[in-house]
């Protein structure tokens, strides 16, 4: 085989994947970016839509509903991820021990993660039901008043957060547990000899050593939390009012109900930029960590 | 210094006995080495003393205070681990000062102590490096430094040198010996390497299968091993063992085996005759044999030298005696020819005799 052919072979094998990538990913994204510059109604063909430049983008900032939706999204993401991190890491710390039946317990713990989001939404909607739901029935039986789980703007966001925490804490739990179990056991033993109490071991030894895994987990969860749709769609459909209308839901409604495809595309792009920013932070962090390790190794070899 | 004492110490894993009732008392400022083949329970014993492993039965006393139910930190001890167990995210200074920081000592005192120990171990230039930036020997030193800054009463070492290469190991061994002379603390040291045990210990405790087989000074163990196991474990190259039977020739008691007859000294003869045991194992160290072409019968073994390993001033010969193998350590300047029968004289005081069934020294 000539060297030329040898050089081209890898590209030949990559070609099918590249074609799929272009057709299934790059084309829709380009289409969306182009659409975001148009005033475009679904009844029109794309050629008939008027070009409006950056108007969709700038108009969004003066749209109180979009700003509200963005703030709900940020609030939702920040709250669920913080709560899930604390609960997930805490559970991992508690369950990182040899107890009989622990494997079964761990399997049960990660079950919520495996349920389809639509189903999760339905389960919680029934549990939150004002009259027949298990929460209100239990509260009533205990002599308390009913809570307007999904019909009050404060409670609906809370309810949605609870459901998301229920579903995604296990993700952080299993990753933290894996990180915890791969820690050098002798370093932890050394800290016991040095006189560290259980809490001091966690604060000074375990958490700092788990940090690389925790940061990546946090960013992954954050990216996911910004994209959440189905559970909220099924539970509240964004209501009451705009109290649980996260961005992805608003995008879907702008496109289907308000019939403003260009605005929906602009919103999607804002979300995409946000997510790409988070991804970039994650990659940069990994790159930095790798560079640091390489530097340490080199220093060690030079003695 | 507090005295460390183990009383009927046992360790069981799910009805599987790993340590069978150990009794041991360490004297003040003694360097005690627990030595034995892997799986003999030496590390488990050390970890029980440290408090990292629970005690199944029996008790550990530090200064007559039972400590087996106390947390490690209440036992006033420092430990050096086989893999160093440094905190990877802390620099050398922080690694060494962690215990003092937990004790909430004043910062000035901590800095002073760390600098003092770093000076002693030659780590002053590395105080701001992370463990990953250090070589194996330096990490080892930091691990010792961490123990030293603690100023604990008892130091525990769990095979601290076994992750180092041979040359560095020798060097660190010497540094350890120096350090132990300087700090004058109780030291308990676990190793599978009998050379480390011999060179460092005030007292060696030989363990096997969860039992203490023998304890004493290196010299006692080398000269008067109480069993074939201890005799074979202590000393390098290891002791030779030949099967033989006791016979009386005239007024002499002799050990007769395939290809050799050795007469015993009167006191040896008296001892073995008292034991009234015919089938025995003869033990003789390679260094207690010497090339002697003119040796009398009854004083010498006739050996066929198979291999001569030249290691400088000394050579180790591998020879056959009948169909058993035997090694000889001697000066390299002896005229040795391979594949020829030659006479080697045995130092009579160096003859050890063991019961063939129980393997106990006679």
Image (cartoon, coloured by chain):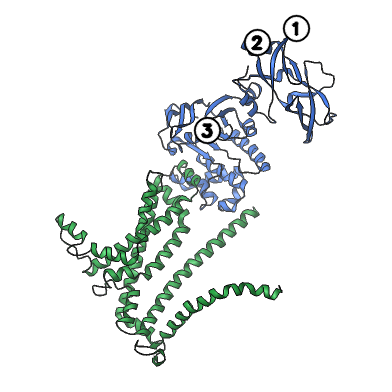
**Chain letter matching colour green:** A
Q: Which residue is mark 3?
A: B41
Label 2: how many Cα within 10 Å (few below 14, some 14–19, many 20+):
some
Marks 1 and 2 on same chain: yes
Q: Mark 2 near mark 3, Cβ–Cβ under 8 Å?
A: no
Label 1's element? loop
Q: Which residue is mark 2?
A: B273
**Mark 1 chain:** B
- Rendering coords of residue A20 (x, y %): 51, 76
Label 3: how many Cα within 10 Å (few below 14, some 14–19, many 20+):
many
Q: Is residue B303 above or below residue B104?
A: above
- Rendering coords of residue B319 (x, y %): 77, 29
- The answer, for residue B361, to whether it is visible in the render is yes
Residue at screen point 74% across, 20% down: B347
Question: Mark on residue B250?
Answer: 1
Q: CA distance from mark 3 to mark 1?
A: 48 Å
Label 1: how many Cα within 10 Å (few below 14, some 14–19, many 20+):
few
Residue at screen point 38% across, 71% down: A227
Residue at screen point 55% across, 61% down: A290
**Nearer to the camera, A135 or A266:** A135
N-terminal of the two: label 3 or label 1? 3
Question: Which quadrant, please, contains the N terminus of chain A?
Answer: bottom right
N-terminal of the two: label 1 or label 2? 1
**Chain letter matching colour blue:** B
**Mark 2 chain:** B
Instruction: Give the left or right position of residue A239, taking residue B194 as reference.
Output: left
Q: Is residue B238 above or below residue B170?
A: above
């Amino acid at each position: 085989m000539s060297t030329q052919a040898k050089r081209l072979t890898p590209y030949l094998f990559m070609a099918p994947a590249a074609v799929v990538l272009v057709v299934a990913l790059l084309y829709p994204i380009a289409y969306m970016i182009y659409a975001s510059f148009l005033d475009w109604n679904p009844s029109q063909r794309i050629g008939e839509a008027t070009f409006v430049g950056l108007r969709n983008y700038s108009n969004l900032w003066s749209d109180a509903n979009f700003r509200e939706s963005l703030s709900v999204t940020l609030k939702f993401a920040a709250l669920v991820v913080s709560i899930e991190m604390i609960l997930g890491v805490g559970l991992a710390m508690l369950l990182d021990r040899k107890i009989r039946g622990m494997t079964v317990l761990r399997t049960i713990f990660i079950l919520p993660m495996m349920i389809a989001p639509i189903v999760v939404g339905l389960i919680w909607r029934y549990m939150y039901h004002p009259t027949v739901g298990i929460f209100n029935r239990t509260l009533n039986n205990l002599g308390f008043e009913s809570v307007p789980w999904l019909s009050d703007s404060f409670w609906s966001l809370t309810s949605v957060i609870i459901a998301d925490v229920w579903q995604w804490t296990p993700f952080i739990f299993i990753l933290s547990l894996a990180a915890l179990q791969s820690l050098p056991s002798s370093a932890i033993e050394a800290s016991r000899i040095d006189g560290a109490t259980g809490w001091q071991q966690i604060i000074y030894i375990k958490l700092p050593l788990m940090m690389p895994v925790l940061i990546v987990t946090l960013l992954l969860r954050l990216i996911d939390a910004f994209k959440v749709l189905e559970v909220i769609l099924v539970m509240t459909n964004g209501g009451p009012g705009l109290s649980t209308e996260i961005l992805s839901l608003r995008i879907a409604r702008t496109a289907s109900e308000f019939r403003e495809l260009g605005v929906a595309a602009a919103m999607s792009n804002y979300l995409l930029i946000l997510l790409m920013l988070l991804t970039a932070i994650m990659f940069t962090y990994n790159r930095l960590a790798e560079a640091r390790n390489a530097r340490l190794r080199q220093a060690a070899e030079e003695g | 210094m507090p005295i460390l004492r183990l009383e009927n110490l046992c360790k069981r894993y799910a009805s599987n006995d790993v340590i069978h009732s150990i009794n041991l008392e360490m004297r003040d400022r003694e360097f005690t080495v627990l030595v034995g083949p892997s799986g003999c329970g030496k590390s488990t014993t050390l970890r029980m003393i440290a408090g990292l492993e629970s005690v199944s039965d029996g008790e550990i006393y530090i200064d007559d205070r039972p400590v087996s139910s106390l947390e490690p930190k209440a036992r006033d001890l420092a430990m050096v681990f086989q893999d160093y167990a440094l905190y990877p995210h802390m620099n050398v200074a922080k690694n060494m000062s962690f215990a003092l920081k937990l004790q909430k000592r004043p910062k000035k005192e901590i800095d002073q102590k760390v600098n003092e120990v770093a000076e002693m171990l030659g780590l002053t230039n590395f105080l701001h490096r992370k463990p990953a930036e250090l070589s194996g020997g330096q990490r080892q030193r930091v691990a010792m430094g961490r123990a030293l800054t603690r100023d604990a009463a008892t130091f525990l070492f769990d095979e601290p040198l076994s992750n180092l290469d041979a040359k560095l190991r020798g060097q660190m061994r010497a540094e350890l010996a120096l350090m132990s002379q300087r700090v004058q603390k109780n030291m308990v040291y676990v190793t599978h390497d009998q050379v480390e045990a011999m060179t460092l210990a005030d007292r060696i405790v030989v363990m096997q299968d969860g039992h203490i087989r023998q304890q004493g000074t290196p010299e006692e163990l080398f000269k008067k091993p109480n069993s074939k196991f201890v005799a074979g474990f202590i000393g390098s190259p290891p002791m030779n063992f030949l099967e033989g039977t006791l016979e009386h020739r005239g007024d002499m008691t002799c050990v007769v085996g395939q290809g050799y007859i050795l007469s015993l000294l009167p006191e040896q003869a008296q001892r073995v005759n008292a034991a009234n045991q015919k089938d025995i194992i003869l033990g003789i160290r390679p260094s207690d044999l010497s090339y002697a072409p003119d040796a009398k019968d009854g004083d010498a073994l006739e050996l066929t030298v198979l291999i001569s390993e030249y290691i400088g001033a000394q050579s180790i010969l591998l020879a056959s005696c009948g169909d058993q193998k035997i090694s000889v350590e001697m000066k390299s300047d002896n005229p040795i020819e391979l594949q020829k029968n030659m006479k080697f004289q045995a130092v009579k005081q160096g003859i050890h005799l063991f019961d063939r069934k129980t393997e106990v020294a006679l």
